[in-house]
Image (spheres, rainbow, N blue to C red):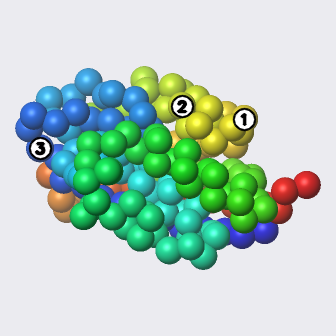
Amino acid sequence: MRIGFGYDVHRLGKNEDLILAGEKIDYPEGLIGHSDADVLVHALMDSILGALALGDIGKHFPDTDDRYKGISSMLLLKEVCNLIAKEGYELNNADVTLVMQAPKIAPYIDKMRENISFIMNTPVKNISIKATTEEKLGFSGRKEGIKAYSVCLLKEKE
């Protein structure tokens, strides 16, 4: 078995969509980044790449490469899933925590879990997504950005 940890952060800004786990969230601001800035999926991918000891998403999908400009992070996650299989592993489970003062995402969590389980070809029960605030402390507490932490466990294919 292999364990990986991931972390990512993006600033919030006007005239951007807020995309989390491939789901468009109703909010007046969105995350700023080279791709769709899906901070949840970026942290998840980093945890997977870490478990495989294959570097980070910047190594695989550099923000200097125009091929990834505006790309859906769900497409990048699919490529990372191909690496899991290539290395002889499969996902046992993943746990992602979003740190954000707003918006409230409870109404979106089930759909976000479904989106990730579909891309990763794993049962929904293997995907956990949670959110917490920082009690109005720090950049996320001031609604300047969102950060995400992820842990995953990969197991050898049977």
Question: In the structure shown, which secondary structural element does the residue marked by tag 1 occupy?
Answer: loop
At label 2, which amino acid type do we have?
Asn
Question: In the structure shown, which secondary structural element does the residue marked by tag 2 occupy?
Answer: helix
Q: State which tag comes first along the sequence, 2 or 3.
A: 3
Query: Which residue in the protein does label 3 denote?
Result: 13
* Pick the front one: 50 or 63: 63
> At 24% from the left edge and 64% from the top edge, which residue is drawn?
64
* Pick the front one: 70 or 102: 70
Q: Quadrant of residue 85?
A: bottom right
User: Image height check: is 96 above or below 58?
Assistant: above
**What's the CA distance linking mark 2 and mark 3?**
24 Å
Q: How crowded is mark 2: few (under 14 residues within 10 Å), some or many (20 or more)?
A: some
Q: State which tag comes first along the sequence, 1 or 2.
A: 2
Q: Position of residue 62 (x, y in %)?
A: 33, 64
At label 1, which amino acid type do we have?
Pro
**What's the CA distance linking mark 1 and mark 2?**
11 Å
> At 19% from the left edge and 48% from the top edge, which residue is drawn?
32
Query: Which residue in the protein does label 2 denote?
Result: 115
Q: Residues within 10 Å of mark 3 (few under 14, many from 20)?
A: some
Q: Where is residue 130 in the image (x, y as percent from the top left)?
A: 49, 44
Q: Is residue 8 left or right of residue 49?
A: left
